[in-house]
Image (tube, helix red, strand yellow):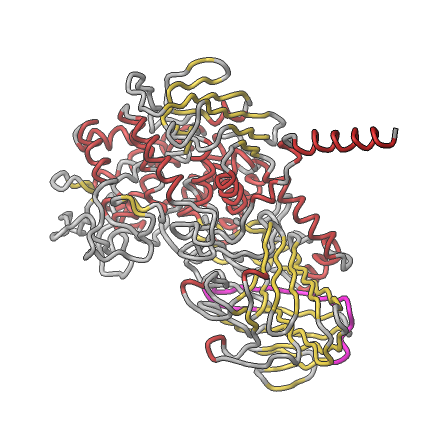
Amino acid sequence: MKYFGLIYIILFGILFGCSKPDAKSEKLTNYVNPFIGTDGPGNTYPGATVPFGMIQLSPDIGIPGWDRIAGYYYQDSIISGFSHMHLTGTGAGDLYDILVMPTNSKFSKRIEKNSFKPFSSFSHDKETASPGYYSVDLLDYGIKAELTATERTGIHKYTFPKDDKTEIHIDLGYALNWDSPTETYLNVVDNSTIEGYRKSTGWAKDQRVYFVIKVSKPFKTYQLFKNDTLTTSPVTAKNTKIILEYATIEGEQIILKTGISSANIEGAHKSLAIEAPDFNFDEIKQQAEAKWENELSKIEISTNDTTKKHIFYTMLYQSMLAPTLLSDHNSNYKGANDSIEKANGFNRYDTFSLWDTYRAAHPLYTILHPERTSDMINSLLAHYKETGLLPVWSMQGNETNMMIGYHAVPVIVDAYFKGIKNFDIELAFEACIASATDNSRQIDEYMELGYVPVDEHHENWSVSKTLEYAYDDWCIAQFAKALGKTEDYNTFLKRSENWRNVYDSQSTFMRPKLKNGEFVKDFIPKEYTPYFCESNAWQYFWSVQHNIEDLIDIIGGNELFEKKLDTMFSLNPLPEDKLPIFSTGMIGQYAHGNEPSHHVAYLYNYIEKPWKTQGLVREILETQYKNEPNGHCGNEDCGQMSSWYVFSALGFYPVNPAQGIYAFGSPIIDSATLNLENGKKFTIETMNNSFENKYIQTIKLNGKLIERNYIKHSEIMNGGTLILTMGNLPNKNVKNTMATSSKVYN
């Protein structure tokens, strides 16, 4: 009986061990690779954070440069510490606040390149990262470093060898790239608690981080420095640091936890008290992973291609690294007016890279995170109340005025039409008007002339500004129409046609125009000039998302528009062409590495050639994203590059981000279920999907065949099933219609 019982147990184990596990039992966090984008132009960081969290606790190489904008570069071989705040995928070198570095007597070398800070070599073989967790062995010291995070706290766990001269360095003077401290403060409260602040300038001109650090093992002594000179506590200076001194035994672990606030030290204390009341690193790590699992589970995909699954969930992960939380548990935060403000009834967010993220990231949030989107809209309006304008590119309670447009407008208008209305609608409309009628950033000339003229400024960007302003004006017009504000509707609808004023029928491009109304001479469309924002005339021609039909007409109809699109994707740069750093991911003149191109592949839908969109979208999905450190073809840009992938992998994309519809492309997954916050499910099934079968043959929504190249936002949010049947040849017999680009569908 024992023999047969054993056989039964073995067979039972084999049967169920080999069966395919339930998809829901899979940990989606296992598919996230935080190293994607840490090499090449991606500028991402691999460290520990939670969705949209205030803390981004990540390793710093300690050496400045474009490649190390996020503090870390995969090709490097040293680490100079772990700082608590980082930007994700931008071209802006800021943050890197509160650097912590454990050391001991085993290694004391210093180098000029990292400003003679302590450092250690490391190997990728002894490094790992997953959502909410990062670890690395500091090889020169024999120290293992592990990091995790909550929304407002960063938790370090260091495993030390035996050493009588173990130290933990906390360096507030450490700065990298554009960042520079202006005033720092350290106060030793007791032998396990340190509090202070770091005020700095950089891209954010007035950044403030208040912090409290607690350690699980009291330090026996410490050294406190004021501008590299030993001093006593408390100390205030531009450059301060403290070295905590220990004697450790083999394998001893010390936990260091940091709570932060942008408002005051009291808020930092409360961050620790509420979010990390003890030193249970593993429990906090598990909580961080659970938070990510919950958010990633909002889209459950099925595909036999594991690589695609890794890319998809990493892109979904990276779409949630910004915007970042700014208010503390007292609802206080550093406002854009440099005062301490209070967020009443909402969480205040910042890090709004709006020129990038209005295109796909914010539309993705309206599907997956409508409740958080409400907080984001209230955050944009808080910025307006603080400064009199909506943000352009804001971070850490500062307006950087980077990039162009007043693109908080489409984010607000899109949210309004999608039913996210837990905000003051009249205040929102007032804010849109104020930002569109301000006299700064050449808006005054735009209002006077109907276009932004060329000037001698290094980044004039006149054509790009005209096109971006015109799109935002269309959004305001639609908002005004919905609110019954007829005069404003007429005004801004007229302004939305200003793109016509820079269209040159001779060259068939948007062309820079002088103040006297003449176009500039010696115009070469593929050249990169100060008249186009990080782009050329080829890439910006298509930026009339709100009126594609008239853009087609002005160039001479569908056939000529198709030829121009074909040329866009086939006119390859010549070896002698000078390509700037942001022209990456090139397919002809199309640059997937920068945002103005992101909607262009979908435009064949508007001329009844959807199969060309399908082929190109699939090509971009297959070639411009990889499951490796050099996996982004350009800056990830706070969620935009990743959101493009998430949308396109599902099979659709918001060409006009505030219109309430999504144009079909070519899905790369076999099926997906969107688990919506309203409790409904929207399922996408792709029949006969494969590498070769990239062309849509038929589209069914809730069992009914549809003959259109788009799906409405409301149809997704109502739940249901979308079935896309794929084939290896274009279906040219069914020319599905595209929605009118100038109409809002809600």
Q: Is residue 732 left or right of residue 331?
A: left
Question: For residue 558, which quarter of the picture?
Answer: top left
Question: For residue 40, which quarter of the picture?
Answer: bottom left
Q: Is residue 735 above or below residue 572?
A: above
Q: Is residue 351 left or right of residue 246?
A: left
Q: Is residue 480 visible?
A: no
Give the residue at x 64% y 75%: 103
User: Where does residue 517 sit, x and y in percent of width and height?
Assistant: 15, 47
User: Where does residue 699 sit, x and y in percent of width and height?
Assistant: 42, 19
Q: How many marks?
A: 0
Q: Is residue 551 above or below residue 272?
A: above
Q: Quadrant of the N terminus?
A: top right
Q: Is residue 279 left or right of residue 177?
A: right
Q: Magenta stretch?
A: 199-221
- Furthest-right residue in this view: 1
User: Where does residue 27 sit, x and y in percent of width and height?
Assistant: 63, 40
**For residue 200: magenta?**
yes
Q: Is residue 161 visible?
A: yes
Q: Is residue 17 above or below residue 105?
A: above
Q: Is residue 575 above or below residue 564?
A: below
Give the residue at x 70% y 32%: 14
**For residue 47: magenta?**
no
User: Where does residue 610 sit, x and y in percent of width and height?
Assistant: 32, 26
Give the residue at x 73% y 54%: 282
- Furthest-top residue in this view: 704
